[in-house]
Image (tube, rainbow, N blue to C red):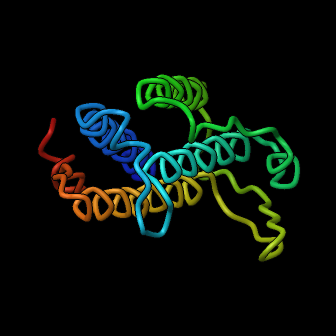
Amino acid sequence: MTHHAMKMYDYHVWANKELFHRLSELGNEVYHQTVQSVFPSISKVVSHMYIVDQLWFHIISGTSMADALEIEKVESDTKSIEEIITMYNELTNQYSEFFNNGVDLDKELILDTPWAGRRETSISEMLLHITTHGAYHRGNITAMLRQNGYSSVTTDLTSFWYSY
């Protein structure tokens, strides 16, 4: 049986693909358009999501938070939607390879964040964080699209359930 956190991570990947497909339909002009919102453009939100997903990959792979924060992050907000989709696909493949090596999702790791300190947490909890972080920002993007007169796509968990 698949671990619940892994199912939620699969939902995260699916939801990103759904949204990225919609963004590619709208094109790079909309993707980079300046918006009065939480982020100044959709590309800035997606870049943030990518950098955070990349950061957490390093952490669940065994890199300390301090070291993961020092890893140079690719400036992705200037990339086209097609380029960021490729980057996300590569990162998703890295996650898949990691999970396919039989990692124990309930393994406890020490997370030491500069803003909150040390705590013991499991890889599965980190996956749930990745999922909820992505859902939050997909909501930002949907609001930004609607604010500019464009429709978004449904990325609700129930839509994921029925997509298979």
**Front-most of 106 and 33?**
33
146 lies left or right of 112: left
Report if residue 3 is visible in the image: no
Quarter of the image with the N terminus is: top left
8 lies left or right of 122: left
Report x, y in % for residue 109.
Answer: 75, 55
Q: How many marks?
A: 0
Question: In the figure, 23 relative to 67: above or below?
Answer: above
Q: Residue drawn at (21%, 46%), measured in percent from left and top? A: 160
Report x, y in % for residue 90.
Answer: 54, 23
Q: In the image as oriented, which residue stretches furthest toward the left?
A: 162
Report x, y in % for residue 152.
Answer: 20, 51
Question: In the figure, 130 relative to 143: above or below?
Answer: above
Q: Residue drawn at (82%, 64%), measured in percent from left and top? A: 112
Question: In the figure, 84 relative to 141: above or below?
Answer: above
Report if residue 68 is visible in the image: yes
Using the rendered view, name the quadrant where residue 60 is placed: top right
Quarter of the image with the C terminus is: top left
Q: Residue drawn at (47%, 25%), measured in percent from left and top? A: 89
Using the rendered view, name the quadrant where residue 58 is placed: top right
Report x, y in % for residue 38.
Answer: 48, 69
Q: Residue drawn at (56%, 60%), measured in percent from left and top? A: 125
